Image (cartoon, rainbow, N blue to C red):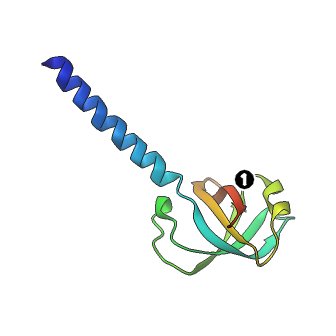
Amino acid sequence: MKNKLAAAVFAVVLATISTAAFAQNAMVNGEVKKIDETAGKITLKHGPIKNLDMDEDGMTMVFRVQDPGMLKQVKVGDKVQFEAERATAGITITKMQKGK
């Protein structure tokens, strides 16, 4: 009986962790409005960023990029998908790819 209970609790915990990890890694659609390679920043018009509790649609923001090399892969007007998280320097893009 204890083993079945432990297995059930483990399954619930595992499902919760998997759901939280998926929510944190959800890609956000955006459009490049401005690139500042010198400052390591990019301005994106984007949809909701659920993992940052930003539910507004059609927002335009300036983001820092974790890797300045990301800025060389895009140009103004490109559609992108990205992941962002809060960092000590502000909201930072941790992953970005051209949109499809």
Residue at the spot 80% in from the left edge and 71% down from the top edge: 35
Determine whether the residue tagged by mark 1 lies in a helix, strand or loop: loop
Residue at the spot 68% in from the left edge and 75% down from the top edge: 31
Pick whichever, 69 or 1, lies toward us: 1
Query: Could you tell me residue 73's position as x and y percent?
Result: 82, 61
Query: Could you tell me residue 49's position as x and y percent?
Result: 52, 66
Is 94 placed left or right of 53 in the picture?
Answer: right
The residue that label 1 is drawn on is: 66
In the picture as drawn, the residue positioned furthest to the left comes out as: 1
Residue 58, image quadrant? bottom right
Q: How many marks?
A: 1
Q: Residues within 10 Å of mark 1 (few under 14, many from 20)?
A: some
Pick whichever, 13 or 39, lies toward us: 13
Amino acid at circle 1:
Gln
In the picture as drawn, the residue positioned furthest to the front comes out as: 100
Residue 82, image quadrant? bottom right
Residue at the spot 79% in from the left edge and 57% down from the top edge: 70
Q: Is residue 54 above or below residue 45?
A: above
Q: Is residue 99 above or below residue 10?
A: below
Residue at the spot 57% in from the left edge and 60% down from the top edge: 27
Pick whichever, 15 or 55, lies toward us: 15
Quadrant for the C terminus in the image: bottom right
Q: Is residue 1 above or below residue 100?
A: above
Quadrant for the N terminus in the image: top left
Is 76 placed left or right of 53 in the picture?
Answer: right
Query: Could you tell me residue 85's position as x and y percent?
Result: 58, 55
Query: Could you tell me residue 30's position as x and y percent?
Result: 64, 72
